[in-house]
Image (cartoon, helix red, strand yellow):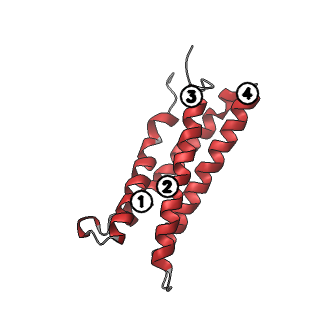
Amino acid sequence: MSHPLHPLIVHFPVACWSLGSLAGIADLFQVETVAGFSAPLIFTGLILAVPAMLTGLLELGKTRGDKVAQDTVMTHISFVLMAWLLYAASYYMRGQDMDNALLLTHVFSITGFVTLCFAGWYGGKLVYTHGVGVQR
């Protein structure tokens, strides 16, 4: 295919994680209409992120020879992995029987969302500044 696959499928885990974080915040304020949506959305995002990350790694070769773009890729990858780990920790904490497990769940989720925003920023920089994946 001539169109890169990564930008197409990355929206699914991003949407799941973003909505999962939002549902978690609503759950803190005891909005019952969204209670219970956070965990399944975060779990789905964790699963869907794997193919998104793999397709991103396949497109890594498009930055060969451009040191600045390669540095941006490494920053993007670092933020994505950090977000994945934070959301994984958030999901894991939901099943723990600890005094502060609920608080940690939301701290990990919100921190994961902020980290995801930085990952998206650097992903956009790859496309719009460095032209990665853009046919000329």
Q: CA distance from mark 2 to mark 4?
A: 30 Å
10 Å neighbourhood of mark 3: few (<14), some, or many (≥20)?
some
Residue occupying the point 44% across, 61% down:
43
Residue extending farthest to the front is 29
Q: Which mark is residue 127?
A: 3
Q: Secondary structure at mark 4?
A: loop
In the rendered image, which residue does mark 1 sit on?
21
Q: CA distance from mark 2 to mark 3?
A: 21 Å
Residue type pointed to by label 2: Phe
Residue 19 falls left or right of residue 136: left
Find residue 92 and report its horizontal and vertical position in percent: 51, 71
| Residue 15 seen in the current view | yes
Q: Secondary structure at mark 2?
A: helix
| Residue 95 seen in the current view | no
Q: CA distance from mark 1 to mark 4?
A: 35 Å
Up the image or down, 121 lies above or below 134; here it is: below
The nearer-to-camera label among 2 and 4 is 2
Residue type pointed to by label 4: Arg
- Ranked by sequence position, the earlier of labels 1 and 4 is 1
The reply to whether the C-beta atoms of the residues labelled 1 and 2 are less than 8 Å apart is: yes
Residue type pointed to by label 3: Val
Q: Which mark is residue 113?
A: 2
- Ranked by sequence position, the earlier of labels 1 and 2 is 1
Residue occupying the point 59% across, 32% down:
125
